[in-house]
Amino acid sequence: MTDLLDYDDVIAEFDPVMGMEVHVELGTNTKMFCGCPTTFGAEPNTQVCPVCIGLPGSLPVVNEKAIESAIRIGLALNCSIRPSSTFARKNYFYPDQPKNYQISQYDDPIAHDGYLDVALDDGTTWRVDIERAHMEEDTGKSLHIGTTGRISGASHSLLDYNRAGVPLIEIVSKPIEGAGSRAPEVARAYVTALRDLLKSLDVSDVRMDQGSMRCDANLSLMRKDATEFGTRTETKNVNSLKSVEVAVRYEMRRQAALLLAGTAIVQETRHFQETDGSTSAGRRKETADDYRYFPEPDLPPVQPAADWIEEIRASLPELPWLRRARIQQEWGVSDEVMRDLVNVGAVDLIIATVDAGAPVEAARGWWVSFLAQQANTRGTELADLPITPAQVAKVVALVDEGKLTNKLAQQVVTAVLDGEGEPEQIIADKGLEVVRDDSALQKAVDEALANNPDIAEKIRSGKVAAAGKIVGDVMKATRGQADPGRVKELVLAACQ
């Protein structure tokens, strides 16, 4: 079992240094260098051609939309856009890399020297400097056949090249120093802010669960009196915001234990284990020289016109944090409440629900209470719940119209989350609409009063609060489909 040092002891002895590499699949209709579609989940090896599987004689052609998206990302990250950037061949062998090299950018990436200011949990801001954002193509995907889905213990592996050639932007931070005990929080906050920014730019769906946004977390430790960085590890393909924080914290504790025991850190890639939050050794990490970069001979330099860059700059949307500041003022909520909404990923969902017609308070209530509980129970991010803001707004409208009680509305929303259809269809199929027939309600009230003569007498003597027991019995008898307010009116009228 891997030895881990207590976190407080790590901070007492070492300063962490991080470097974040985030790969983002662009939401283009076709691949980076060919016309193959990029639809997620297609049958294996149905979205391939000679170019993306690297057949001899095939020639790549750059996707203009991918270049535009790269420029949008670079500008939003406060980067300089290079007037002329080139592609290179990055040579390495993976089974899922069909050409045995990857077309990427090396010496002169399209965007460089930027920054992103991110908000931490207490409202303070941390600036992460961006070294570069460069264009490249994705690899294919290996499917390991066995009980675990991993290569260890698999009987054989299958290769799906549908993903090979999908446009990627890799965003590389400069070393993040000085975070101390907050390093894991800074890592999570940075990836969170980056995801929000990319989503607002409409360049990617940033679905970490589907691999369209993947984070590689580099970490090294320096002794308090050291002047040089320590040896780093690179935890690959971390695929959730929480996992980014967990992975950084684990590596800090693991490396510190090794260093204090006199064991050198190996420069290597590591795999994050979702089950227990640990990391395990992958492969020794190559240096840039090992990749034998050389200019891609089949692609000319990318030279975006200055007026096109400015046109793209002018089209950038309101940045997420500026939008939140404006929304916070409009909603009239405190900084603390807004931070909580941001931390659970509810802001954009609430905005979209309000845009779909729901009042702010109702929209906020659904997303931060019932739906947040559902996300926690189902082990997913709030934004990844299988329900749309429009569907939530519809449920809110049905409650406001008196067609659903809050309890019935929760049943409807749960059914939507379970994939049973649209709210109206679920109500019809399950017979969940509020009972509006006073004769049926009166019958249930009379039966409840007859079964509770002592309670009925208390109500008649003026103890109105006692009506709650009768209302509860009627709600139970009608399977929650009665309007509690109307039931109470009928109870009090019957006891006059």
Image: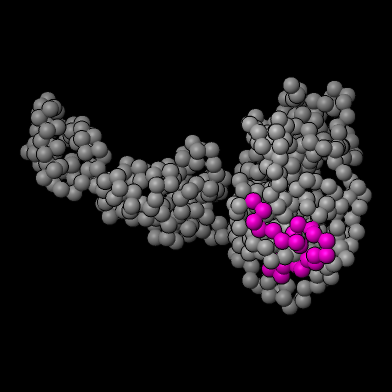
Q: For the N terminus, which image quadrant?
A: top right
Q: Which residue is painted at 70% across and 33% down in the image?
A: 155
Q: For the C terminus, which image quadrant?
A: top left
Q: In this view of the protein, which residue sits in the foreground, 393 or 341? A: 393
Q: Quadrant of residue 46?
A: bottom right
Q: Is residue 145 above or below residue 176?
A: above
Q: Which residue is painted at 90% across and 40% down in the image?
A: 228
State the predominant SS element of the stretch in magenta: loop
Q: Is residue 474 above or below residue 197?
A: above
Q: Position of residue 84 (x, y in %)?
A: 84, 70
On the rendered structure, is 222 left or right of 483?
right
Q: Residue furthest bottom?
A: 307
Q: Which residue is painted at 81% across and 72% down in the image?
A: 303
Q: In this view of the protein, which residue sits in the foreground, 158 or 381? A: 158
Q: Is residue 141 visible?
A: yes
Residue 80 lies in the magenta stretch: no
Q: Position of residue 162 (x, y in %)?
A: 67, 54
Which of the colour schemes (rainbow, by chain, secondary structure, one colour) is used? one colour
Residue 57 lies in the magenta stretch: yes
Q: Quadrant of residue 102?
A: bottom right
Q: Position of residue 218 (x, y in %)?
A: 78, 42
Q: Is residue 73 visible?
A: no
Q: Is residue 73 above or below residue 463?
A: below
What is the count of numbered marks?
0
Magenta range is 44-73
On the rendered structure, is 81 left or right of 469?
right
Q: Which residue is painted at 36% across and 43% down in the image?
A: 410
Q: Position of residue 127 (x, y in %)?
A: 73, 51
